[in-house]
Amino acid sequence: MRIAVGLANIVLGLIYTCYGLMTIADLKRGWATMGFSHFGMAWIAMAFTCGPHHLEHGLHAIASSDAGGPLDLAAVLVGAPAGVTWFLLRVEALRGGPGDRPIHGTPGWVRAIPYVSTTYVVAAIIAAIVVVGRAGTFTPRMTPNVLLLLVYSLIGYYLLRTQLTNRDVVGGWSLSGLALTLVFPTCGLMRATFALYAASSRYTVEPVGLVIDWLAVPAAVYFVWVTRALNRGVLTDWNEGATGALPEMAGVGNG
């Protein structure tokens, strides 16, 4: 289990790091003609804090004697489909492809997302109670991951509002936007799972990891500001990394 948790987090960390590198390529390509991109910069800050968090956690899990947590592995695996989908769409966009897929109407699998998500959250809460039990002790070292659960969930909320707005405007959904919407709350649950295992003394919060986690908090708050401003239509952004995340009514182009 320890090796599985370590490898899963390392793979996820590499994917997040690639997110950041791809967004840098987006910015480099468009900055000279279209200017600064808040969405792109916020995403770079997110990627280069989430990526190192998972890399550090994964390497520590493999190198240490800490017992791997099944809930940790489950949280990564549940979040993987959305993250991998968004990653592959971004790779496609960098290669000159559309980087998105329109979803017309509301197919059954989209209608099932709220029910599956609710089931997952309830199961995660029950599992968290079992993991922590009566012996759990929260310390200040776990604070950033608890804060990130809240902030990532807020980002997911604003991205969901954008998807609902776009559905009313264009009569459908964006695969990229749905994937990105799911990425953040699932990442928040990964952070919460790490904090739970740390509270139960199964995981150790190393100084390097603590610094990375605290740096992730302002990065996440910046991302909240950007997504909220885009959702309200008070900010426009050209960066194609925002495909599916920008309100259609704002009249903002991508790419």
Image (cartoon, grey):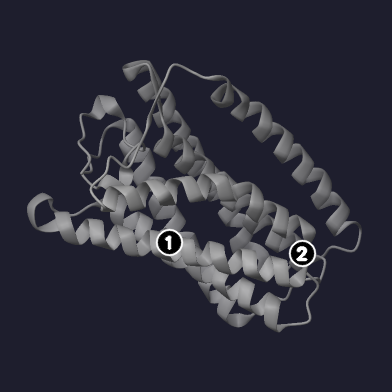
- In the rendered image, the residue lying farthest to the left is 33
Q: Quadrant of the C terminus?
A: top left
Viewer-closest of 47 and 235: 47
Q: Residue at x 37, y 55 (%)?
A: 43
User: Marks 1 and 2, how far apart in space?
Assistant: 23 Å
Q: Which mark is residue 64?
A: none
The answer to which image quadrant residue 135 occupies is bottom right
Q: Which residue is mark 2?
A: 197
Q: Look at the image and tell me whether residue 140 can be seen.
A: no
Q: Which residue is mark 1?
A: 47
Three-letter amino acid code at disc 1? Ala
Q: Residue at x 22, y 58 (%)?
A: 27
Viewer-closest of 13 and 43: 13
Viewer-closest of 117 and 188: 117
Q: Residues within 10 Å of mark 2 (few under 14, many from 20)?
A: many
Three-letter amino acid code at disc 2? Tyr
Residue 42: x and y in percent read 35, 55
Q: Look at the image and tell me whether residue 115 can be seen.
A: yes
Q: Quadrant of the N terminus?
A: bottom right
- Pick whichever of labels 1 and 2 is earlier in the sequence: 1
Residue 236: x and y in percent read 22, 39
Question: In the displayed structure, does residue 73 sit left or right of residue 174?
Answer: right
Q: Residue at x 55, y 65 (%)?
A: 11
Secondary structure beneath label 1: helix
Q: Residues within 10 Å of mark 1 (few under 14, many from 20)?
A: many
Residue 60: x and y in percent read 66, 79
Question: In the displayed structure, does residue 124 sit left or right of residue 189?
Answer: right
Residue 133: x and y in percent read 90, 56
Question: In the displayed structure, does residue 8 sit left or right of residue 101?
Answer: right
The answer to which image quadrant residue 250 occupies is top left
Q: Up-down: is 200 above or below 236?
A: below
Q: Up-down: is 79 above or below 247?
A: below
